[in-house]
Amino acid sequence: MRINNQFTRLFSSTSIRNRGQNLTEKIVQKYAQNLPNGKKVYSGDYVTIKPAHCMSHDNSWPVATKFMGLGAKKVKNNKQIVCTLDHDVQNKSEKNLTKYTNIENFAREQGIDFYPAGRGIGHQIMIEEGYAFPLNLTVASDSHSNTYGGIGSLGTPIVRTDAASIWATGQTWWQIPPVAKVELIGNLPAGVTGKDIIVTLCGIFNKDEVLNHAIEFVGDGIRNLSIDYRLTIANMTTEWGALSGLFPIDDKLIEFYEERLKKVGSNHPRINTETIESLKNNKEQGDNDAKYAKHLTIDLNTLSPYISGPNSVKISTPLSKLSKEEIKINKAYLVSCTNSRLSDIQSAAKILKNQKIHPDVEFYVAAASSLVQKDAELDGAWQTILESGAKPLPAGCGPCIGLGSGLLKDGEIGISATNRNFKGRMGSKDALAYLASPEVVAASAILGKIGSPEEINGGKPVEAEEIVKSIEIPNDTTSSVIEDDSNAAVDIIPGFPTEIVGELLLCDQDNINTDGIYPGKYTYQDDITREQMAEVCMENYDPQFKNIAKPNDIIISGYNFGTGSSREQAATCILAKNMKLIVAGSFGNIFSRNSINNALLTLEIPNLINKLRNKFKDNKELTIRTGWILKWDVTKALVTVTDENGEIVLTQKVGELGTNLQDIIVKGGLEGWVKSELKNSN
């Protein structure tokens, strides 16, 4: 494997606010609200966004409950909202059916576009029905909204509070992430698929290289990738750790929509002659002088079929190697929003034609939507799969999320064309799950072991080559840095501080999870007081934290701080300690959103945690009073850190905190801001 780890200076640090924008920034620019005249947005900036559409699925009722709890009675823009039922569609219990009825009734009363159970997976519907459309910004309260990037729509996940805010006001906030350019060069060899590309990327760049980044795919290798391949790749950028995965607008994408137009008819509200003609005339792309935090390259010519797992997307192994291990399987799956589109079903059908599923294997198939299943039935591919012995499931999520029939049992091994193989996700925690392309899943179902289509007729899998890849990172910037611009000036609203100052309190550990920050045993004690929350803050990380921390301290920690569960108390217990800001090398995405939603500010400054780690490398205490003082000049978006002697050890630009975001903090968080907006509109 040839690895080119060049750490080169890629971008100029002058006139940053006059530079070009990448495609991600350009799309955000279109959907950002209340920007000063002529203001350009860049990675790191906090902006208020009004997305084109917002989708929720089975979680629509919890969102509706939160929406009503805010005092809202009518959604701001019912054409912005889409509700689908897709996750637990096999569950016919009274409780689940009541929830589904509540969602449908709410959607009908509000005039919201609603798609019932059986119509398909929400992400597929968003693409089929043109809600997610090239060059728009579409969000969903589901982590796989990254999928929309496959058709050039900037799709990114939000949490339920954000969804409720959009329902009530049409808006929420977003910090534009650092953008990684992923260049695909060359052409895929025969038998290698889009699934193999993303499985390989997850496995060879498996050190959080793109964690919490937006990804833009570029390169000559894209032009021969089908839109279905692009959707699969974009879908699994979630598993790679990214917040979005965006493909460019090109002729192949326009051809895709011209074919789609033939099916939906000329009167479709979103996919029609006018919208496609507009797309033809506006193949927006990033500027030549746009900045990217990282540049990753992979040569598609060097790829072969790859398998992910077991039980981790960070492990990828060539099929040619894994096949030799004779790994017997019990279950196989062709389901989910990742690989259950028509081309996936057709590809599996070609392998299964005139074949039978191995007697020791259960093979489950579900189309991504009812429209996909109908097309597969007309094509004959659906019947071919059933004749092989596959067990059909309704269009929906099902076993991918660990719901319904066909789940993995203790000791079983499964191979799936889904997106996640986390331990216990598809059934028992004592089972093993592998991920592969539809072709490999179908072949393995016939063989009774993990194997290739070639082996069905006595052949051998294609041997893997050394993968040619590279990564380039600016050597004196980090993913969260906005370079200096002496003319930058951020307006400050009444009630928001012009600067935030505090001593840095070092919690030197990576991956401190939300249970370490706020123990799970307190999560559902609804009567716990603010003082009690402060007392147990960081208890599972360091029992002495409560005695060391002081008001206005600033916690600084390592990478992926706040990973784990979505409990909001991980943010509010820090606020209860009278701390207003937390700094880390990077944050878990849900923690970041919960923090701002509850008025806790966050900054990613990898350079700073690295300096402190070097300074205190011999100190074994879990929580260290550093004596270093951080000052964040909000008006200049500038952080300055001085050591215990008053010497400056770091000066760094950070993302601009716009007045809209300041207003959320002043109002006590997103819920307080929404209530204020509703009050002002009445």
Image (spheres, helix red, strand yellow):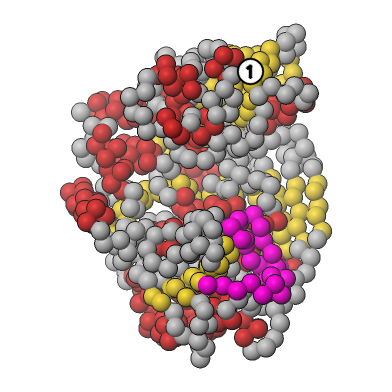
- The answer to whether residue 251 is above or below residue 646 is below
Q: Position of residue 339 (x, y in %)?
A: 50, 67
Q: Quadrant of residue 63?
A: top left
Q: Which residues are magenta?
A: 303-330
Question: Does residue 212 appear in the picture of this structure?
Answer: yes
* Residue displayed at 74% across by 50% down: 471
* Residue displayed at 31% across by 48% down: 60
Queried whether the magenta region covers residue 56, the answer comes back as: no
Farthest residue to the bottom: give it.
354
The foreground one among 253 and 215 is 215
Q: Position of residue 150 (x, y in %)?
A: 52, 60
Q: Position of residue 18 (x, y in %)?
A: 62, 34
The foreground one among 238 and 82 is 238
Q: Which residue is mark 1?
A: 504
Q: On the rendered image, what quadrant is the C terminus found in?
A: top left
Q: Amino acid at mark 1?
A: Leu
Queried whether the magenta region covers residue 306, the answer comes back as: yes
What crowding class fits label 1: few (fewer than 14 Cα within 10 Å), some (14-19), or many (20 or more)? many
Q: Report whether 326 appears left or right of 464.
A: left
Count of numbered marks: 1
- The answer to whether residue 621 is above or below residue 266 is above
Q: Quadrant of residue 434?
A: bottom right
Q: Report whether 300 appears left or right of 151.
A: right
Q: Position of residue 376 (x, y in %)?
A: 41, 79
